[in-house]
Amino acid sequence: MNKSFGQVDYEAQMLALEKQIYYEENDSLLSNYALEKFNLSIPNGDYERSFMELKRVNDNFIVEDNIKKDFFWNAALVSKLSSNYEYANIYYDLYLNLTNDTSYSSLLLGLLIKEEFDTVVFKKFREELPTDSILGCVNCFDKVNAYKLKRKGAYVFTSRIFPGLGTMLTGDFYNGFGSIFTVGGSGYGVYYLINNEFFIGSAGWGYLFFLRFYKGNINLTKDKVQKLEKKRRNRLAKECYSEIEKVLIKYPIDFRLNQ
Amino acid sequence: MKIRFLLIFISLLGFQSKGQIDPEFISYLVISDLNSEHHSYLNEFEKKYGLSDSLIFYKTKFSLYTNQYDSFESLFSKCALCLKDTSFVNYSTSHLIKYSLSNTLRIWKIDSINGLGLARNSLLRRSYDLSVNPNLNSSFLPKDLSYHFLEYKDAYNKKAWVAGLLSTVIPGAGKLYIGRTNSFLGAFALNLAHGIIAYEAINKKGIKHPYSIISTGVFGVFYLSNIFGSVHDLKRVRNEKRKHFLYEVADYQSAGLFLYE
């Protein structure tokens, strides 16, 4: 483990605080040390560790409202950054209950947290937002969540009628052509065998090859349709995040470590 | 004069106690899953008091706990206390064998060269020897492990050439011989189907007809795969059973042993 001087210093401070926690019997002081550790861990950028420290803090022991307010804010942000969305939502609601903060930064953080949940929670939060232009861009989240590829069944149906075509229509020409070749080739083979009265051979090749290739072609199309839908949704999400990024530059969401 | 000596003695005791690792604090760090703090704590000691035997012991434990097996191996070779602790040697080899057999063998080697050879008569070591030669005396194995050993021994004593020969005579029979009944049915049915198709083709059009050549070729590929598959499968079954047996022994040996009390 090669660590810079800063990192060594940080680890030493974390250890010193942990020792204090270990020897401390007073719950209030213990929680204070845990809060100190949590705050100390944030600038280091290891949000998984910060989240672990966060869970040790008992907010009931935080007396000053300013400290509590900053703690809830940081806790919501750390939870979001470490992908613990349930916690992020809880801490954000606690922050909002305490502060009624309607600044753009606060509302943006709320939106980014709530958008991870089902659309009902997200819609409810959005309805309470002021309807002005700056937060208008968040509508794109709706589009992302609601996006569904149109005529999905048509791709599969096409592949049933003309093997490989549905796959080609999803944009995968290589595999689509492969399906045409394998299903067509094996189908022709079975036809040839029947014509030449190879009845056992036609049944065997039909079952062992043609049917499998045909079913495989349909499953492949279904899979490609799912991938196409995901790809398009991701593209929409990317566009949406670039819109949000513009707002975030204007109203940044930063940790609050002044206290 | 006596009081002065007493004071010096007390201060020396105090100095020594400051230089000792607190096992309870370490246990607390382990329970709380605070690996970074645990690492810092051990490093802090090294900086302050240098590398003592007990510190190497704790560092060795830590590297095993955090699955840093290469570092564990190098620390283990320098760890005088580890080499005297039968429980630790048994625990570590039981843990390590699931990660790598070669690492475990090296630990045993270190134990026999640098240490007291504590692992030589351990259940795992003897079971390992038994897995190399299953025809050795296995009476030392507890009842719970005998079953797994017999399973392995059964696979070990099966001959690859017999599996191959059986599959040559009756496609899939080699799989039945090594205990894979379901695979036997699949292989037999597939070879039978291809055999019949090839027979039909030859019977109607003669061996030189392109369809007969293709059908016979496909049948040949499946038939040969079935033979080689049986031989290969036997090796796989042997390895699986051996691994399973050794894992069971490792679990048995490490039951009731803990890295940190």
Image (cartoon, rainbow, N blue to C red):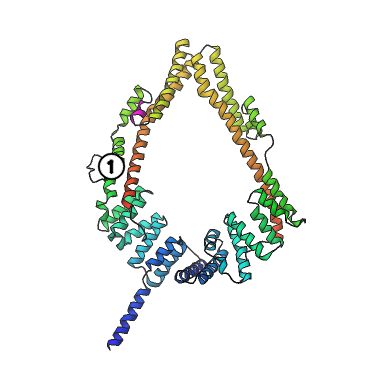
Badge 1 crowding class, 10 Å Cα cut-off, few under 14, some 14 to 19, many 20 or more, is some
Across and down, in percent, residue A14 comes to: 50, 68
Q: Is residue A243 magenta?
A: no
Across and down, in percent, residue A38 comes to: 54, 65
Q: Which residue is mark 1?
A: B146
State how many labels appear.
Answer: 1
Which residue corresponds to the image point at 35% horizontal and 60% vertical from the top-left? Answer: B75
Q: Secondary structure at mark 1?
A: helix
Q: Is residue A113 left or right of residue B24?
A: right
Which residue corresponds to the image point at 28% horizontal and 34% vertical from the top-left? Answer: B157
Q: Amino acid at mark 1?
A: Ser
Q: Nearer the viewer, residue B45 or B216?
A: B45
Q: Is residue A131 above or below residue B160?
A: below
Across and down, in percent, residue A33 comes to: 52, 70
Across and down, in percent, residue A166 comes to: 64, 30
Q: Is residue B251 above or below residue B58?
A: above
Q: Is residue A194 above or below residue A101?
A: above
Which residue corresponds to the image point at 49% horizontal and 72% vertical from the top-left? Answer: A26
Q: Is residue B9 above or below residue B158?
A: below
Q: Is residue B150 left or right of residue B39?
A: left
> Which span is picked out in magenta?
B171-179
Identify the chain of the residue marked 1, using the numbered disc in the image.
B
